[in-house]
Image (spheres, rainbow, N blue to C red):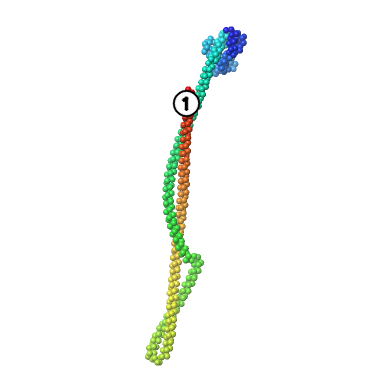
Amino acid sequence: MEPEVLQSVLEESGIQVDMKNLQNPTEEFMIYLITEYLSKYHLDVNQIAKPTLEQLECLLSPDSPWEVIKVINLFSALSSFCNEIFLVDLCLTDITSPGPKRARRQIKILFNFFAYYKNKMVEHETSFEELDNRQREIDDMIENKSLSIAKIGATIDERESKIEYIQMLRKEIENLQKHIESNNKKKQELENQVGEIMTRHQDKHKHFTDLKAKAIQLHKITVELQSKIVKSPEEYASRSSELKKVIEMKKEERQELNDSIQKKKLQIKKNESAQELVKDLKDKFQINSKDTYKQLKEVTENLKLVEKKLNTLNHDIQRWSSIEKQNSTDHSTDNDYESHKQLLFELDNQLSDKERECNSQKKMLESVKLELDGKKSILEHELSNIKATENDGNKKLREFKNYFRKKILEEMNLREQIMEKVFGSNHEKL
């Protein structure tokens, strides 16, 4: 081919060359044309010209022939095109030491194929655009499908984690139900214990009420008895001394009375002897009335005096007898006072014993009451804890149920959306 025609072909391909280079091509010119030719196909010539790993391993020193490696790599890249367009006689010497005619022929074949490629690209540009659009759609579909698959995988993982969480919650609910059942049993046992304790408390309270009533009654009796006895030792001593003085006075009066009685008895004996004497004199007077009238008169007067004295003596005897009876009565009163005092002392001791017994019973009942109150407070606290635990368990159960319903609805909606996005839309596009 003539150099002028070849120059026009190259200019149509967008490559400016000198006529001198076409007439006498050199190695640099051939490398330039190969570089521009490969660039027309959007290939990275710089990357192609770089040595491979095998070539780098074969290099012995930094002064290795890098230009030779570049030429070899460019020749290898161009050979792949030559094999496709049936340019089989291209060799490495066509680049390093090209002949003019052979080089122009090879350049013509290569750039004619590029012109053919360019024309075909223009003719099939619409098809290529459709293919590109189709490829982009396929890539988008693949990307959407990958995203959907990733979402489905994430949803499945989330669902598995939710299922595990649900199983854990179910186990927790079962544990809570068992705990609630045990608490209910414990609550029933505690209620039974409370009932028994309340029954015992009522019995103790009734017994305490009876003892309290008895203690109040005994206290009233004690107050009444204490009001009748001497309360202080000083009063008791003064009272005792007064009683001793009265007793001494009574003894003296009794002794005087006894002495008077003895005197009166002697006087009575004398009066009786006087009466006998009067009787004898009367007998004698009857015998000798005249002679003894005067004597009789005197004796009669004496007799009257004696009778008066006798009456007086009888009156005194009666009075002293009444006094003696009164003294004996006073003495019995003193004995009654002593016995009464002893009785009061015994009653006071019994009252003190009863009060101590009542106080001990009261303390025992108060301790029992405190114990019952403590157990009652403990039971009330346990019952409140059980009730709070039961309420918390029911609340958590309701929350878990609502949470399960909500998550199941979300899962169903998400599945429907995934099915619509992945399978429905892809099916319509396909």
The x, y position of residue 110, in whole percent, is: 55, 11
The x, y position of residue 69, in whole percent, is: 57, 15
**At 43% across and 44% down in the image, what residue appears?**
184
Nearest to the observer: residue 181 or residue 350 = 181
Amino acid on which the number 1 mark rests in the picture: Gly
- Could you tell me which quadrant the N terminus lies in? top right
Q: Residue furthest front?
A: 428
* Secondary structure type for disc 1: helix
Can residue 76 be seen in this snapshot? no
**At 42% across and 90% down in the image, what residue appears?**
294
The x, y position of residue 213, in whole percent, is: 44, 59
Nearest to the observer: residue 242 or residue 304 = 304
Q: How many marks?
A: 1
- Relative vertical location of residue 420 with respect to residue 248 in this rendering, above or below: above
Q: Residue furthest bottom?
A: 291
Q: Quadrant of residue 94?
A: top right
Q: Provide the residue designation for mark 1.
A: 424
**At 45% across and 51% down in the image, what residue appears?**
372
Nearest to the observer: residue 188 or residue 419 = 419
Task: State left or right for residue 229 relative to residue 106.
Answer: left
- Relative vertical location of residue 150 with respect to residue 391 in this rendering, above or below: above
Task: State left or right for residue 41 relative to residue 291.
Answer: right
Q: Quadrant of residue 255?
A: bottom left
Can residue 373 be seen in this snapshot? yes
Q: Residues within 10 Å of mark 1 (few under 14, many from 20)?
A: few
The x, y position of residue 244, in whole percent, is: 48, 71
**At 43% across and 53% down in the image, what residue appears?**
202
